[in-house]
Image: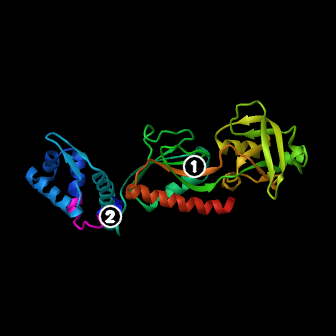
Amino acid sequence: MAKGHILTQIMDLNLIGLFVEIVESRSLSAAARKLGMTRANVSQRLKLLERETGTQLLRRSTRNFELTQAGHTLYDCGRRMLEDLNTARASIESLGQTLIGRVRISVPTGFGRMFIGSKLREFARMHPGITLNVTFNNRIEDLIAAEVDVALRITRTPPLDCVARNICPIDWNLYASGGYLEKHGPIERPADLEGHTLVAAPHPDRRVTMTLTHRHDEADVHAITMQPALQSSDFPFLAEAVCEGMGIGLLPAYVPYASATCGLVHVLPQYRVAGPQDVLYIVTLPNRYPSPATQALIDYLRAEIISLAQIWS
């Protein structure tokens, strides 16, 4: 039986709620106790529901029951209907009211300190009823173990057991200080990079090979190997090293737009550099009905990050 067929015949949401409670309680008696009804009354209402649907929903024995195919369909659809109704009720009740609650969020160290920290402080001022618990961490994978509700992650492969909202791409570019370029000569083509030192995120090899592709000619591709002089997962630290002339930095495109970054020069801007991670996601645990506080933070961050990305893209 099609999912919509059963529900189009049912107008009484109370009966649907009763059926969902029976299934989740695993017995008519347990459902009756929870609902403050007699078992006979629950059984009578179940029979009424089966008459309205025109099909058997449960196969009952003396001790337990099992769902029929129609019962499975009604339970799945009915549970979603009740959840939607509860969410709508909560949203209506919260209109004009101060959002309250606690949200635990994890953000990458570099992107977090350069941009998101100030945005989170702004959100906290806008919603004094929401308590933010903020962690700066690049390595959190298990949100449950880390006790995190929302995580910002820059990665190519978000966790499969989470809900990952694609917010914006993160390009990678080569940067240097003006002083470094004056001392070591101009860099006008990819081959000019050979022999220079590199400042970048950790890489397992002693020498790092990068792929540079011309932005307007996909056939113009170069593999360039450079020697790392300094490696770190903390991009503010790397940006400071590049500003001090310690080498050419392989950095996310947002780095030069941070307020604390001093005049970095984009090296070979006509080429795109393949970076290790290229998409920023907002990651949460599967939950069709996040709390109003959590949803407010997700919506706020999405809008703010998209606005920022228009500057550095």
Label 2 to label 1: alpha-carbon separation? 49 Å
Q: Residue at x 24, y 48 (%)?
A: 23
Label 2 packing within 10 angstroms: few (<14), some (14-19), many (20+) = few
Do residues under tags 2 and 1 come within 8 Å of each other at their CB atoms?
no
Residue on which disc 1 sits: 112
Q: Is residue 119 above or below residue 63?
A: below
Residue denoted by label 2 = 5
Query: In the rendered view, does 158 fall on the left or right side of 221?
Result: left
Q: In which quarter of the image is residue 42?
A: bottom left
Return the residue found at the far bottom: 96
Instruction: Note whether 311 is above or below 256 in the view shown.
Output: below
Instruction: Please report the residue visible at 16 percent of the width from the left and 45 percent of the height from the top.
Output: 30
Instruction: Name the image quarter holding the C terminus.
Output: bottom right
Badge 1 density bin: few <14, some 14–19, many ≥20, Cα 10 Å: many
Q: In which quarter of the image is residue 6?
A: bottom left
Q: Tell me, what colour scheme is on the image?
A: rainbow
**SS under mark 1:** helix
Q: In the rendering, at what x and y percent does residue 156 appear? A: 62, 46
Residue under the point 83% across and 50% down: 178
In the image, 48 versus 173, the foreground residue is 48
Residue placed most toward the observer, 110 or 287: 287
